[in-house]
Amino acid sequence: MRIGFLGLGKMGTPMALRLMGAGHELAVWNRTEGRTKPLLREGAIAAATPAEAELGADAVITMLFDDEANERVIFGDNGLLEALSPGALHISCSTISVALSKHLGEEHARRGIDFVAAPVFGRPNVAADGKLWIVAAGDESAVERARPLLEPLSRGISVIGADPWQAHALKLGGNFLISAMINGLSEGFVYAESQGIDPAVFLEAVNNALFQSPLYAAYGKVMLNPPKEAGATIDLGAKDTRLLRQAAAARGTRLQLADSLAETFAAIQKAGRGGEDWAAGQYRMAKQRSKTSA
């Protein structure tokens, strides 16, 4: 298939390369042109604007950082939405607000364009291996159209409903649980250290005894051995927590743990470490707070 791919950040680039490896033809666009080079070397075509990426495409995939980037690329000058024709397919893999996802669904439906929300779970290395888990929602026929493009990216796809915004809501809820897990691990490691127990030994024993979770093992490893380059960042975690709280508040719901996590993210950002790894940064803050309270 011919695909327009918009957004070549830490997640978008490996995803686009996976699609090319599966035999699809890509026209790619990114706000920073240098990001397109790895794809161009593999045979992708550079699009000058988001609208140009859609020309002749069977589908367009967006993998953009936040609501602001999505609004600019989709609704702005030379934006995607005006270029899409009735019957076209737009797959949104971005993690965005429920409010924006609802707005996108309404605007696509008004124009007769298929819109599938398909946010992904996984870090950049998981994307490179084609082992993301994808949460999809949209009209049944649109989801089936999207499936051949989602399968090369993933080890599994959960289709959760006909309303695209529900997939974005679920993704925010999943990211909240990851943040909560990291927060709990951080304080667990701090406690273990206070008792003279190696945090790595603590993690192995507790995970084997109680959780048997690859996610605990993987994030624990990142926390204890911070990567040179962050996968997900503190800024990203703060953004997703804010969107989760907004979605909950819109339904008259308050999440006290999410409020606490938002305070932690804000403190890390205030210290100028918003670009730090999502997991390692929370652990560092937990250690600092434990010394302060002592």
Image (tube, rainbow, N blue to C red):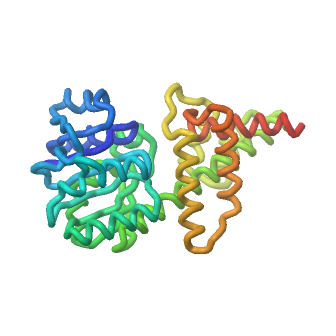
Residue 59 point in image, percent of width and height: 19, 55
In front: 170, or 214?
A: 170
Marks counted in the figure total 0
Residue for point 68% across, 33% down: 271
Outermost residue to the left: 56
Q: In the image, is residue 178 above or below residue 27?
A: below
Position of 129 with respect to 282 (left or right) is: left
Residue 147 point in image, percent of width and height: 25, 60
Q: In the image, is residue 58 above or below residue 111?
A: above
Position of 21 with respect to 134 (left or right) is: left
Outermost residue to the front: 77
- Residue 137 is drawn in which quadrant? bottom left
Q: In the image, is residue 285 above or below residue 56?
A: above
Residue for point 77% across, 34% down: 288
Residue 200 point in image, percent of width and height: 68, 35
Residue 95 point in image, percent of width and height: 43, 53
The C terminus lies in which quarter of the figure? top right
Residue for point 70% across, 41% down: 267
Q: In the image, is residue 274 above or below residue 171?
A: above
In front: 287, or 114?
A: 114
Outermost residue to the right: 294
Looking at the image, can residue 56 be seen?
yes
Residue for point 29% across, 67% down: 107
Looking at the image, can residue 200 be seen?
no
